[in-house]
Image: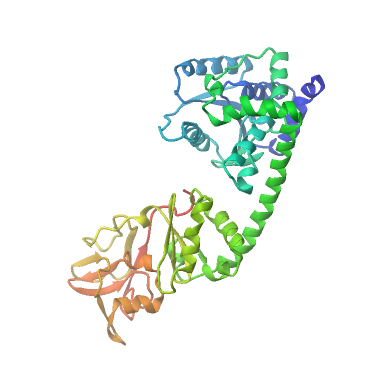
């Protein structure tokens, strides 16, 4: 133990080598054992090594009365080490899982603080990794979940690093005692009603008594599973490249995939590719809910099936699957007068419209399709709008929110559809910017 403890600073430095040129290292400092040791190690390394700017952040959840003393403790530790500390108070939403809600509140702050070229350092160690693997195994997680905690991942505009994942809790305790460090013992860590604490205090000691190397072996399994997940991600990228084809409705600004290349894959490969694609957009469905994807694929050719997920919907239309969220799921308000056609008109829950070229005269209105609309075309005479939209292959979910320009009861133009978006000889065109929201990351 003594040798590995002496070795701890150099191991930490080796683990952080790729990030030595970062602008800022910020330690997520709870005041507990793990983050106290991490902060102490870094503060002492900074005296002899050229390291990035070092600081700490303490998140005060205010969930238990005893926690009110923790910010002061953290401040005194940081003052003694000469490390600047930021204390952030958060409100934890009550719900089914207090642990999850507290974590979400914490990471929302971490995301907002972590700028480009910043590194956020957290103190999770090898025992935490083994507990995470076992916890997720008991919840029926797949390869991604059983990869446990990654050594690094994106947070905010920067990177989150867990540099102590190859260090045991026993090593951290030995270091803390040798340096006479004081740390906070969170009473909730002893509460056996929390599943993780039950694993930590009841299950793990029994396992390590019988198999002393259990935690090391489990951490190694998590690393193997992470490598397997890496291969699945590479396969997903290959499959998604085949499906991410160009199409004539790029201007919608919506994430979409061509269905035919996906449909040619095995069911498992479809789920793998789609999970990879959906992960930044929504919380992923559990195994039982993937039937929604089968229903979407197998619906009749002329149907417009929808798969509702936690943070949006997947629609099948015009030979593609489309991700819709935010404003796209709200029904636009019917009809509005366009008082000043020389400037853009903002539409409720539907982006905005504007003219290019000479503005048409008269009293103008923007409406949405109700059914039965007819448009006068120079060459073809009167045509049903429904038929015109069918000819263009306009996705079903777009049809009810395509801005239609009326002068009195005359349908003058359909935004963004070439040949229908203004007069034949092009004195003006009607343009629609569908949404001001970012349809990407939720």
Q: Residue 2, image x and y in percent?
A: 80, 19
Rendered-image quadrant of the N terminus? top right
* Quadrant assignment, res 303: bottom left
Q: Nearer the viewer, residue 410 or 316?
A: 316
Is 209 in front, or is 326?
209
- Residue 298 percent coordinates (x, y): 48, 68
* Residue sitting nearer the eye, 235 or 19: 235
Where 283 sits versus 77, above or below? below
Check the image and tell me how it is coloured. rainbow
Q: Residue at x 59, y 39 (%)?
A: 138
In the rendered view, tell whether residue 12 sits above or below residue 183: below
Residue 79 x, y percent position in the rendering = 58, 16
Q: Is residue 27 visible?
A: no
Whether residue 181 can be seen here: yes
- Which corner quadrant of the image does residue 300 belong to? bottom left
Q: Residue at x 60, y 44 (%)?
A: 145
Along the line of sight, the residue nearer the viewer: 432 or 230? 230
Position of 188 compared to 400: left or right? Answer: right
Query: From the viewer's perspective, is residue 385 above or below residue 58?
Result: below
Looking at the rendered structure, the number of numbered marks drawn on it comes to: 0
Residue 23, percent from left and from top:
62, 35
The furthest residue to the right:
3
Q: Quadrant of residue 154?
A: top right
């Amino acid at each position: 133990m003594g040798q590995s403890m002496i070795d701890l600073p150099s191991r930490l430095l080796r683990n952080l080598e790729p990030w030595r040129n970062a602008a800022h290292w910020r330690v997520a400092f709870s005041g507990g054992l793990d983050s106290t040791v991490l902060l102490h190690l870094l503060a002492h390394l900074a005296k002899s090594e050229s390291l990035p700017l070092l600081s700490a952040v303490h998140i005060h959840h205010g969930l238990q009365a005893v926690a009110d003393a923790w910010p002061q403790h953290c401040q005194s530790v940081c003052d003694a080490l000469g490390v600047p500390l930021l204390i952030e108070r958060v409100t934890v939403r009550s719900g089914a899982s207090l642990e999850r809600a507290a974590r979400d509140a914490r990471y929302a702050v971490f995301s907002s603080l972590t700028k480009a070229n910043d590194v956020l350092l957290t103190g999770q160690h090898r025992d935490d990794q083994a507990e995470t693997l076992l916890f997720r195994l008991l919840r029926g997680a797949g390869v991604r979940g059983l990869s446990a905690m990654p050594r690094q991942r994106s947070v905010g505009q920067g990177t989150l690093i867990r540099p102590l994942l190859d260090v045991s809790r026993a090593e951290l305790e030995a270091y803390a005692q040798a340096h006479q460090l004081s740390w906070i013992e969170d009473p909730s860590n002893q509460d056996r009603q929390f599943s993780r604490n039950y694993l930590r205090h009841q299950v793990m000691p029994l396992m390590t008594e019988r198999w002393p190397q259990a935690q090391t072996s489990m951490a190694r399994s998590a690393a193997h599973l992470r490598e397997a997940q890496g291969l699945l991600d590479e396969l997903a990228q290959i499959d998604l490249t085949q499906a991410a084809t160009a199409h004539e409705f790029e201007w919608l600004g919506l994430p979409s995939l061509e269905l035919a290349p996906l449909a040619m894959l095995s069911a498992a490969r479809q789920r793998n590719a789609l999970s990879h694609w959906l992960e930044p957009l929504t919380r992923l469905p559990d195994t039982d809910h993937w039937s929604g994807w089968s229903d979407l694929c197998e619906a009749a050719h002329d149907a417009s099936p929808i798969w509702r997920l936690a943070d949006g919907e997947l629609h099948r239309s015009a030979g593609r699957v489309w991700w819709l969220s935010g404003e796209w799921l709200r029904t636009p308000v019917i009809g509005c007068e366009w008082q000043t056609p020389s400037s853009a008109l903002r539409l409720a829950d539907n982006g905005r419209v504007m003219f290019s070229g000479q503005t048409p005269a008269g009293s103008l209105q923007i409406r949405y399709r109700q059914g039965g609309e007819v448009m006068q075309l120079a060459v073809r005479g009167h045509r049903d709008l429904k038929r015109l939209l069918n000819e263009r292959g306009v996705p079903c979910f777009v049809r009810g929110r395509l801005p239609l320009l009326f002068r009195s009861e005359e349908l003058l133009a359909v935004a963004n559809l070439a040949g229908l978006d203004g007069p034949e000889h092009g004195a003006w065109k009607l343009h629609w910017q569908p949404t001001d929201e970012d349809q990407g990351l939720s």
